[in-house]
Image (cartoon, helix red, strand yellow):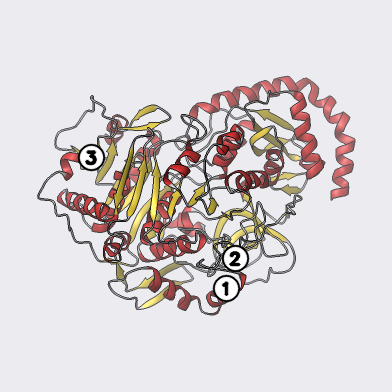
Amino acid sequence: MSQERLTTLLTEQRSYLPPQHGKSSAWVCGSEEAEALYRAALDDPNDFWAARASQLLHWFKRWDKVLEADEERHKYRWFTGAKLNASFNCIDRHLFSGRRNKAALIWQGEKEMDVRCFTYQMLYTEVCRVAHALSSLRIRKGDRVALYMPMIPELVIAMLACARIGAIHTTIFSGYAEGGVRSRIQGAKAKVVITADAAVRAGKLKPLKANLDPILEKCPSVAHVVVVNHADLYDVKMTPNRDIWWHDLIEDFTLDVDFPCESMDANDPLFLLHTSGSTGKPTGIMHSTGGYLTYAAHTTQWIFDMRDDDVHWCTADIGWITGHTYGVYGPLALGATTMMFEGVPNWPKPDRYWRMVEKFRVNILYTAPTVIRSLMRMGEAWTERYDLGTLRILGSVGEPMNPEAWHWYHRNIGGSELPIVDTWWQTETGGAMISPFPYATKLKPGSVTKPLPGVDAAVLRDGQTPDMDTSEGRRSGHLVIRKPWPGMMLGVYNDEEKYQSYFQRFGCYESGDGAEVDEDGYFWILGRIDDSINVSGHRLSTAEIEAVLASCPEVAEAAVVPMPHPLKGEGIYAYVVTRDEVPWSEDVRKKLRDTVRRDIGALASPEYIQFAEALPKTCSGKVIRRMLRKIAGGTYDDLGDTTALAKPEVLKPIIFGHQNLMLGQHETASAAAEEHGQEKDSTAEKQD
């Protein structure tokens, strides 16, 4: 970011006090209690985390030391000497605490009548059988097992079975293309792959086993493939001595339904999860057993005020870290009921989420801003036909939530009463780092509020070090975490250089995101540092411009990227998806530009606004802006790794639209610049 200030000109003035109803029974029941927790974590972090670990988990052996830190190599080991097992903590211990016959996992298939429910006892039995079966395939502690599976209960069972025997699971999202699947299996050197005959999505079948077969020709480490019969495909090819059906594997009556769990060291890896990051090259993030599970349970309890009778629905696919932490390990470690959904929010109709909230009496809904914006696009009528009264907490994750989407979520889903816990975190952090307490934090739409107790987050500029005082006034810069926390990554699998790169610039964990901290200490996430735009020496936040565009009633969502500019260095290029009923027109373009000029300033006015039917996204809903940057710059052939795209087919229309926009505006660009240049230069001088 060099030395320029990451400029934020947009401010959200509205704020909301935490609700009073339900406050008295909350885990953190008010601002005074929250402040006491902040102080306790600050005064003695080791005692704070030791107390939370003791309260939340069952340990076979207590730790010798809470934290061992090698500051020079940035190696941090939590609860050294301790022994535990993640599967035991998520299942076994609940059998003796009155939860044996309580629902642990509710699964809703894409078809309305496809519902499966597992009590803690049922889940225990299935996990033990699969753990024994994997052991019979000679999977041992430390071996890697790849899970290339759709959102079905067998995925959760397989994860917990691996954890039970000490195998390291690596979950591969079922929407990945061949390259994405192959690189992850090869990178982990997996000995077993568990998959399904097909995934079901929006009424269509995507073969998984058939896709996997040619990939495995280049994966010599794989000895066995276990296949779940999910879609009843009749032509699944099974390779003798390698492939075996899931039901054949676990229907062996000699399998132990009380298969014992492995005693794991707190710093043994629990799972390996690859993240594409900003470059598209998969990075294998490793998380430990003791530190990660402590942090997952800790944040789940406090952020969502998790209660014993809650039905918790994290809508993220389990192929992503959000699904790991808040779909599986966090809720199950606390003995709650977690929900799992195979389908998509707008199929067969845009009311699917709200139908499920009513059907299963969901209490906590944790979803992504991109989901909220897509459902906003469909209109409010779809929400009004359902009883959403069981909801008490709403959550957001994945990217900055623009204030307009925040207010729609608050008003139409929360009845203008429910708290929204807007969270910031990453695959590398293991769990949420910055988030409000639902019953203790004043909310500002668009802000993730303050770091959680025990999390030392700050914004730093180049040339600063973690111990410099940055507490004065409103400030922006690189978002960093200055001290270790239990959920932090154990390392990067077979890539020490990549791991060290997270700490090189400031000597502490650098997130890669930009953020601003306001006068109240509230954090506003500005997106990836790489996504800022340097316009005539002024560095602007793309997230801010996107938020203004999304505030227009015509806009469903927007993505803003830099483009080369001969005079300014970089110009602003906006991709806009309009609501279904809004036709594309120059009038709409003009209104969007005028809105940005009014709310931010002429400096932030887009050079080009391209309308699009859809944006390139990962299946977790994140817009892949690196591809949009290349297209805006006229590069069409080298867009990088597209295996993480949910719908690769959206790229061709975007490229075609960019070409047409450039051709159509080439002749008028000079005239437009001359007409508006004087006014823009004048405004820019005033802002400077």
Disc 2 marks a residue whose amino acid type is Ala
Q: Considering only order in the chain, which callout, 2 or 1, is on the residue closer to the N terminus?
A: 1
Q: Is residue 233 left or right of residue 54?
A: left
Residue at image mark 2: 440
Q: Is residue 67 left or right of residue 98?
A: right
At horizontal 45% and vertical 72% (from top left) the residue drawn is 70
Residue 532 rendering spot, x and y as whole percentages: 67, 46
Q: Quadrant of residue 288?
A: bottom left
Disc 1 marks a residue whose amino acid type is Glu
Residue 621 rendering spot, x and y as whole percentages: 52, 40
Residue 406 showing in the rendered view: yes
Between the residue at mark 1 and the residue at mark 2, the CA separation in whole angstroms equals 8 Å
Q: Secondary structure at mark 1?
A: helix
Q: Which mark is residue 33?
A: 1
- Asked whether the residues under the numbered discs 1 and 2 touch, taking CB atoms below 8 Å apart as contact, a structural biologist would say yes
At horizontal 61% and vertical 60% (from top left) the residue drawn is 19
At horizontal 40% and vertical 72% (from top left) the residue drawn is 55
- Classify 10 Å Cα crowding around label 1: few (below 14), some (14-19), many (20 and above): few
Q: Secondary structure at mark 3?
A: strand
Between the residue at mark 3 and the residue at mark 2, the CA separation in whole angstroms equals 49 Å
Q: Which mark is residue 225?
A: 3
Question: Mark 3, mark 2: which one is toward the viewer?
Answer: 2
Q: Secondary structure at mark 2?
A: loop
Residue toward you, 39 or 209: 39
Residue toward you, 633 or 436: 436
Residue 586 rendering spot, x and y as whole percentages: 76, 24
Residue 79 rendering spot, x and y as whole percentages: 38, 72
